[in-house]
Amino acid sequence: MTCAEVRELLSAWLDRELDLRTSLEIERHLETCPGCSESRDRLVALQAALKDPALLEPLPPDLTPRVRRALRREVPRAAVSAPWSLGVAAALACAFLGGRYLAGVGGAGPVPEVVSAHVRSLLPDHLMDVASSDRHTVKPFFHGRLDYAPPVPDLASDGFPLAGGRVDVVGGRRVAALVYMRRQHVVNVFVVPKAGGALPPPRMVDGYAVRGFEAGGFVFWAVSDLDPAELGHFADLVRTAVGS
Ligand SMILES: [Zn+2]
């Protein structure tokens, strides 16, 4: 991958919109290219700046009328060249401010990210880098690919056989993804070292059940189209197997 290609894809990569193979190619390139790493750092800094809590305060109730009034003063100039630009500018201003406002309210943590990683994994050839029901094959696969060793519990006798694992990208970092099966349903489990902060309650997103829980110094994010109660049972099994 050339520098030009990498830089063109950087913001899509940061937004986790790329498939795993392309993401890994970009990461490999970034490891060895100072120029592109610098571009990435600038983008990351920009995104962090946009998440500044100062930007997340509730919108003053009179903001929209003030924006409209300010724009109306511009009408004589704007209306001549592009009559639609007033509406477009107002819509953009409201979309931007409204979007920032909403971003501060949800508190969903990485929930949307693990759901999109789950959906991405269901694309052809994306589910597993290592396909095995043997934890002694799956666990060593992560060695050297991640800077931590995720626990890989064996839950076959509980009706959740292991199918394999892969390295995925969630929140811009490489994480362990374990794949379990329940009948014909895929259960993706993203495992990351515990970093503090409260986990959001179990929820449904886009028809998928999502459950974050802690065990053995790790945070597990389980995502599946299983019934939420069944995913809760799965979480209990993982907690018991891994220990706390
Ligand atoms: Zn480069």
Image (tube, rainbow, N blue to C red):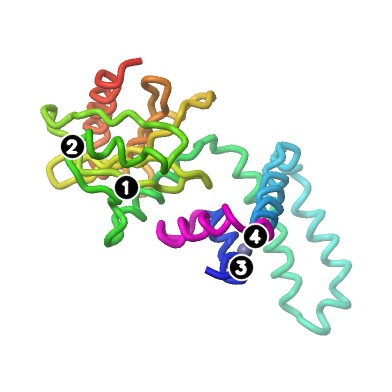
- Left or right for 38, reference 121: right
Is disc 4's CB within 8 Å of ligand 1? yes
Q: Locate residue 160, reporting x and y percent.
A: 17, 34
Mark 3 Cβ inside 8 Å of ligand 1: yes
Q: Viewer-proximal residue, 118 or 96? A: 118
Could you tell me if the residues under marks 4 and 3 are in contact, i.e. CB atoms within 8 Å? yes
* 82 or 100, nearer to the observer: 100
Secondary-structure class at tag 4: helix
Q: Amino acid at mark 1?
A: Gly
Residue beneath label 3, please? 3
Asked if the residue under mark 3 is in contact with the one under mark 1, i.e. CB atoms within 8 Å, the reply is no
**Total numbered labels:** 4
Q: Which residue is mark 2?
A: 134
**CA–CA distance in space, label 3 to label 2:** 40 Å
Q: Is 82 drawn above or below residue 28 in the view shown?
A: below
**Which element carries disc 1, helix, strand or loop?**
loop
Numbered range of the magenta stretch = 16-36
Per the rendering, the mark at residue 36 is 4
Circle nearer the N terminus (4, 2)? 4
The residue type indicated by label 4 comes to Cys
